[in-house]
Image (cartoon, grey):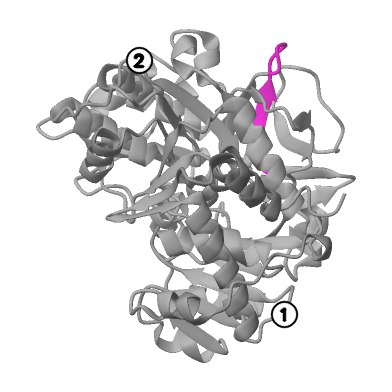
């Protein structure tokens, strides 16, 4: 059936069921679904007037905004391919993505500098050019018969912790499947008010955009994350749901405990993007009583949802509190050994995933595509195990696993032990060179304001919680926050690099 599994179907449903209700809120601007739909049709007309063709790549470099949501939805509806860019990247990284994608147009909310020389046309959001373009363009209806569910909807560039950036090809089918999966684990209704606060260039920021449109829910947009601004919006706009990466969750928990707001409407706080320390969830229960914490796991390559826990608080103080939950409705998981064969329940191996949400491949990278997609399964590079009830336990990214004295040390387990100390605000663990052990466990820690702790004290604390070979051999204390990628993941590679600079080979 043409058009059913595309972005256009989501808009048509919202207009029919919630046309006069609020669709988007940002600062002082409020749009209904009828207004949103009219602007999307003008965007379609504008893309035609810009001489772009179906299948052309259109890049977006912007903070969260109403234009970004319109471009996220409207570019695929018009049969073009969106390319959201990480605004925290350096100019050479941005230039690489633009050239690799072959982008013809760049929509941006800042001076593009030399990036403007790579594309045929730059449209400035911040200077009013975007609105002028829409105002002057004729509204153009979407052609359902010309749009197919397997058409490419976007190229989403990965990067930051595991190597060179790759353009993940996600189709309409992939992203619609994710909207269905999200509704399974984090249900939404027309009455929900969802806060978009993670950067939309990342899957965590755009994860519920299409779901919200399908349901006719309201999206309230936070242009740039700050914990105080987030909590102020929750109180002022009656926010019911949001999603953040763990660093965002931790920051808002600390802010709410220090300076409480009225968050009585706030019923769902989801987190994903990287593992969370359970101590953050425990403090979250104090900060947001009555709020369900939802743990989501996935990858850009899976559009992104794979597993989830609908109420993480219910699992606290049980073995399953450390799990990433069970597969969402549209996903299947198999743990495999190095030979590619499934391995028994409870044993660790690589997490492989199958479902309608799995990417079509990597843009212009056939070898990497063949390595990641095998016989219909996506090989995630994550190390994990499942229990008898299908709960997934993520042990580490395979490249971040430490091998010390022949023993595998999974960083997440060590980090959880460190976070259990009341003085610790942030922590990360990675391997450093050791003549005796090959690699030694090293921790980098940021303490809470006013707290003091020595390396020896922290090591002894960990020794009481985890096996001796997992205990950090060395501890570095920092006063500044740990460096993170655009999506909020700690940049272990950046922290680790100085320790391996003099070695012929590094652990990657």
Please identify the quarter of the rendering in which residue 502 is found.
bottom left
- What residue do we see at 72% from left, 11% from top? 388
The residue that appears at 69% across and 45% down in the rendered structure is 176
Locate residue 377 relative to residue 242 in the image: left or right. Answer: right
Q: Quadrant of residue 426?
A: top left
The residue drawn where x is 26% and y is 22% is 287
Instruction: Report the number of numbered marks.
Output: 2
* Residue 384 magenta: yes
Residue 180 placement, left or right of 438: right
Mark 2, Cα crowd under 10 Å, few <14 / some 14-19 / many 20+, is: some
Q: Nearer the viewer, residue 418 or 23?
A: 23
Identify the residue under disc 2: 290
Q: Position of residue 109 (x, y in %)?
A: 38, 73
Left/right of residue 380 with respect to residue 477 in the rendered view:
right
| Residue at the image point whose x is 61% and y is 31% from the top | 183
Q: Residues within 10 Å of mark 1 (few under 14, many from 20)?
A: some
Is 287 in front, or is 389? 287
Q: Position of residue 454 (x, y in %)?
A: 20, 30
Element carrying mark 2: loop
Examine the rendered structure and indicate whether residue 26 appears above or below residue 267: below
Q: Left or right of 287: which side holds 312? A: right
Residue carrying label 1: 53
On whether residue 91 falls in the magenta region, the answer is: no
| Residue 255, position as x, y percentages in the image | 20, 34
| Residue 316 makes an appearance in the image | yes
In which quarter of the view is residue 450 placed? Answer: top left
In front of the other: label 2 or label 1? 1
The span from disc 2 to disc 1 (Cα, nearest Å) is 49 Å
Magenta residues, as a range?
381-390
Mostly what secondary structure, the magenta segment? strand
Q: Nearer the viewer, residue 73 or 120?
A: 73
């Amino acid at each position: 059936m043409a058009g059913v599994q595309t972005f256009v179907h989501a808009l048509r449903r919202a207009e029919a069921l919630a046309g006069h209700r609020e669709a988007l809120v940002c600062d002082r601007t409020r749009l209904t679904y009828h207004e949103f739909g009219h602007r999307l049709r003008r965007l379609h007309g504008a893309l035609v007037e810009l001489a772009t063709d179906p299948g052309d790549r259109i890049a977006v470099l912007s903070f969260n905004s109403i234009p970004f949501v319109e471009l996220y939805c409207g570019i695929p509806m018009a049969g073009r391919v969106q390319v959201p860019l990480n605004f925290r990247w350096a100019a050479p990284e941005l230039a690489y993505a633009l050239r690799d994608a072959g982008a013809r147009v760049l929509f941006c909310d800042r001076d593009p500098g030399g990036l403007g020389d790579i594309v045929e046309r730059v449209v400035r959001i911040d200077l009013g050019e975007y609105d002028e373009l829409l105002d002057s363009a004729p509204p153009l209806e979407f052609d359902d018969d010309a749009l197919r569910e397997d058409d490419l909807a976007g190229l989403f560039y990965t990067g930051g912790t595991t190597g060179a950036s790759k353009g993940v090809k996600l189709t309409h089918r992939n992203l619609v499947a994710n909207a269905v999966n999200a509704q399974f684990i984090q249900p939404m209704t027309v009455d929900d008010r969802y806060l978009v606060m993670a950067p939309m260039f990342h899957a965590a920021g755009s994860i519920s955009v299409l779901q919200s449109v399908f349901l006719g829910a309201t999206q309230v947009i936070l242009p740039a994350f700050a914990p105080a601004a987030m909590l102020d919006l929750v109180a002022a706009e009656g926010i019911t749901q949001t999603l953040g990466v763990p660093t965002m969750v931790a920051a808002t928990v600390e802010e709410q405990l220090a300076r409480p707001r009225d968050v009585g409407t706030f019923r769902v706080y989801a987190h994903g993007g990287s593992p969370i320390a359970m101590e953050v969830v425990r403090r979250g229960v104090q900060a947001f009583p009555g709020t369900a914490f939802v743990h989501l796991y996935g990858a850009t390559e899976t559009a992104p949802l794979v597993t989830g826990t609908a109420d993480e608080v219910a699992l606290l103080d049980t073995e399953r509190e450390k799990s990433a939950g069970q597969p969402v409705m549209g996903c299947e998981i198999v743990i495999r050994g190095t030979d590619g064969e499934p391995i028994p329940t409870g044993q660790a191996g690589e997490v492989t995933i199958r479902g309608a949400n799995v990417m079509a491949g990597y843009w212009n990278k056939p070898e990497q595509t063949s390595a990641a997609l095998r016989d219909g399964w996506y090989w995630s590079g994550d190390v994990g195990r499942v229990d008898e009830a299908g709960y997934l336990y993520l042990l580490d990214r395979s490249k971040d696993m430490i091998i010390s004295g022949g023993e595998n040390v999974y960083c997440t387990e060590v980090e959880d032990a460190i976070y259990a100390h009341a003085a610790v605000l942030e922590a990360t663990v990675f391997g450093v060179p050791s003549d005796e052990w090959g690699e030694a466990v090293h921790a980098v820690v940021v303490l809470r304001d006013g707290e003091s702790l020595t390396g020896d004290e922290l090591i002894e604390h960990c020794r009481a919680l985890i096996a001796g070979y997992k205990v950090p051999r060395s501890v570095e204390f920092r006063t500044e926050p740990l460096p993170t990628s655009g999506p909020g993941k700690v940049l272990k590679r950046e922290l680790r690099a100085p320790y391996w600079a003099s070695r012929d080979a590094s652990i990657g």
